[in-house]
Image: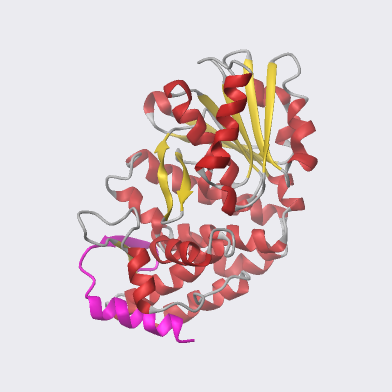
Amino acid sequence: MQTLKVDLADRGYPVYIGEGLLQQPELIRSHIKGQQVLLVTNTAVAPLYLDRVKASLTDLHYSEVILPDGEQYKTLDVLSQIYDRLLADRHNRTTTLIALGGGVVGDMTGFAAASYQRGVDFIQLPTTLLSQVDSSVGGKTGVNHPLGKNMIGAFHQPNCVIADTTTLDTLPDRELSAGLAEVVKYGLIGDREFYQWLVSSMAGLVGRDKGLLAEAIYRSCENKARVVAADERESGIRAILNLGHTFGHAIETAQGYGAWLHGDAVAAGMYMAADLSRRMGWLSLDEVLALEQLLLQAGLPVRPPLMTVEQFLELMAVDKKVLDGQLRLVLLKSIGEAIVSRDVPEELLRACIESAVAV
């Protein structure tokens, strides 16, 4: 087991990464302060891992909620199922919510924990690569709205993150690829050495080499923890974690949540951000083409679905990164150096989108 710390003073917490961690009751129990627990999972994960986690909670006042599986269910209506169970079973302020699943389960459980009785404890047990390297770390929680992704939410840090890498054995190939998009992101935004390691290791990662996957998860979490510690609530540098996300969220919203996996949309968005960075004079064509090959090798798309330029721009305009009516885009000054730019000429942005949707 490897352990790293998200350093946020009294809100800091450990991230545990290793095989078989869900079968270590003492690890989960050491981060539960009260006697009440609500375990939230979904219909895909429950048959695989619910009993394993329940075995760690046998002497506690235990409840469970099994949500439908899919991004399309990341809504306020479905979120109410968590509140209904908390209230029906009379959970108090010492309760601990446990999120067992991917990013949707983690985001919704975290938001419920942030808002129930104005804030209770929760634990992240991420079971997908994307959630292990990204969404479970950093305290972003929330749900989607038909007009925009993750527009309703809160910052609420977990007590701990326990990433059991054996859960990746049951992960479909498409979802493994989706997680690799976020892994590649960390190399692009701030760790050129890691990016070069990914170039040489991608075949093994796609082939599910356990050692390589463990290293990729640790390096990704290490990069994210460093950024979150420097800017917990995204008032500055943390925005670079959104590389490709403004384009990607527009894709997800246009297609309907769940039609494109989040990682697929981010991959296409990162390629578009790299192309726009080239148009700004920062990346070379060879660097953009090399990124394209890396994403394709990971099994990821590099082009968005058919959309008009106006539709793209309209959806991007309601993204959370718009500030005072001004679109902020995360771009690359170089491989391993991301910036947040408010000064992208509209003609370059339009040319980038036109090129992407024309293929």
Q: Is residue 216 shown in magenta? A: no
Residue interval drawn in magenta: 334-359
- What colour scheme does the image use? secondary structure
Q: Nearer the viewer, residue 229 or 175?
A: 175
The residue positioned 71% from the left and 51% from the top of the image is 168
Q: Position of residue 84 (x, y in %)?
A: 59, 27
Q: Position of residue 204 (x, y in %)?
A: 68, 65
Q: Is residue 355 shown in magenta? A: yes
Q: Is residue 322 left or right of residue 29?
A: left
Q: Nearer the viewer, residue 279 or 216?
A: 279
Task: Please say if 21 is above or below 296.
Answer: above
Q: Is residue 281 left or right of residue 40?
A: left
The residue positioned 33% from the left and 78% from the top of the image is 278
Observer able to see residue 30:
no
Task: Please say if 230 is above or below 94.
Answer: below
Residue 162, image quadrant: top right
